[in-house]
């Protein structure tokens, strides 16, 4: 909390299923444990890149399951080096700890704060075998801005790296496509790509 303003600069963001809480000494062990699990998932690109707890547009945040209180993932961003105004977004919802829809709700909670803190473009990088994420981003018939052929070596193979850049309106439209299945929408959320649903 800022002594000058009396306002916490990084408040928790609470949704129906998850709450995002800023990285701190109180949850650092949980974040470290999630980082170790994340490094084992090929779609996350292996070992996480070096990062700081607080990026240009906000902090690393822990995704906590509101029902169980368990730490189930992380969401973070920072400014792309050499590209002022471009925020790189990384969302990790552990597939064994989280439920379908948790990653999307965390994204919907987190992304508006990046633009509110001055980001002009949101940059996403997706490995070409991550079909679920490519399907989500392609739902509005939006191709990647850049395809770097055989760029990343993961799991014993070279994969293309797809890069996307979205302004505030584009990102809101993508999230808006899923608002009807997010909490408060017209129906319960289904897994993006499966029939599983979180418990109410």
Image (spheres, helix red, strand yellow):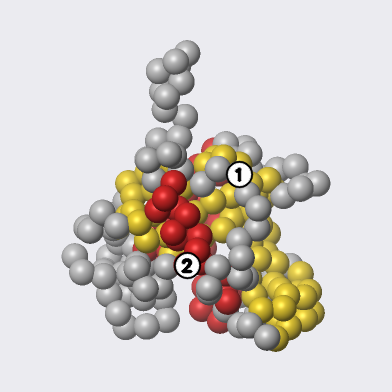
- The residue that appears at 30% across and 79% down in the rendered structure is 196
**Left or right: 167 in relation to 191:** right
Q: Position of residue 104 (x, y in %)?
A: 42, 63
Task: Look at the numbered discs 2 and 1 and tell me whether their residues touch, using CB distance below 8 Å.
Answer: no
- 24 or 141, nearer to the observer: 24
Q: Position of residue 118 (x, y in %)?
A: 62, 37
| 67 is higher (above) or lower (below) than 159 | above
| 40 is higher (above) or lower (below) than 113 | below
> What residue would you read off at disc 1?
52
- Of the image marks 2 and 1, the number of the one nearer the N terminus: 2
Q: Position of residue 39 (x, y in %)?
A: 55, 68
User: Which type of secondary structure does the marked residue at label 1 adopt?
Assistant: loop
State the mark number for residue 8. Answer: none
> What residue would you read off at disc 2?
37
| 108 is higher (above) or lower (below) than 28 | below
In this view of the protein, can residue 115 be seen by the observer? no
- For mark 1, does the 10 Å Cα neighbourhood hold few (<14), some (14 to 19), or many (20 or more) residues? few
- The residue that appears at 37% across and 83% down in the rendered structure is 194
Residue 140, located in which quarter of the rendered image? bottom right
- Tell me the quadrant of the picture where the C terminus can be found: bottom left
């Amino acid at each position: 909390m800022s002594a000058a303003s009396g306002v916490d600069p990084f408040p928790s963001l609470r949704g129906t299923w998850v709450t995002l809480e800023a990285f701190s000494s109180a949850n650092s062990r949980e974040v470290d444990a999630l980082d170790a699990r994340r490094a084992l998932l090929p779609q996350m690109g292996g070992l996480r890149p070096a990062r700081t707890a607080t990026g240009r547009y906000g902090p690393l945040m822990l995704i906590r399951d509101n029902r169980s209180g368990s730490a189930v993932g992380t969401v973070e961003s920072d400014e792309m080096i050499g590209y002022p105004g471009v925020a790189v977004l990384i969302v990790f919802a552990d597939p064994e700890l989280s439920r379908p829809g948790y990653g999307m709700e965390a994204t919907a909670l987190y992304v508006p704060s990046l633009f509110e803190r001055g980001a002009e473009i949101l940059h996403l990088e997706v490995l070409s075998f991550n079909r679920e994420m490519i399907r989500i981003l392609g739902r509005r018939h939006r191709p990647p801005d850049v395809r770097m052929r055989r760029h990343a070596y993961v799991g014993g193979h070279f994969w293309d790296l797809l890069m996307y850049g979205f302004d505030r309106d584009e990102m809101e439209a993508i999230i808006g496509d899923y608002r009807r299945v997010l909490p408060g929408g017209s129906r319960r959320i289904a897994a993006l790509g499966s029939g599983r649903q979180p418990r109410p």
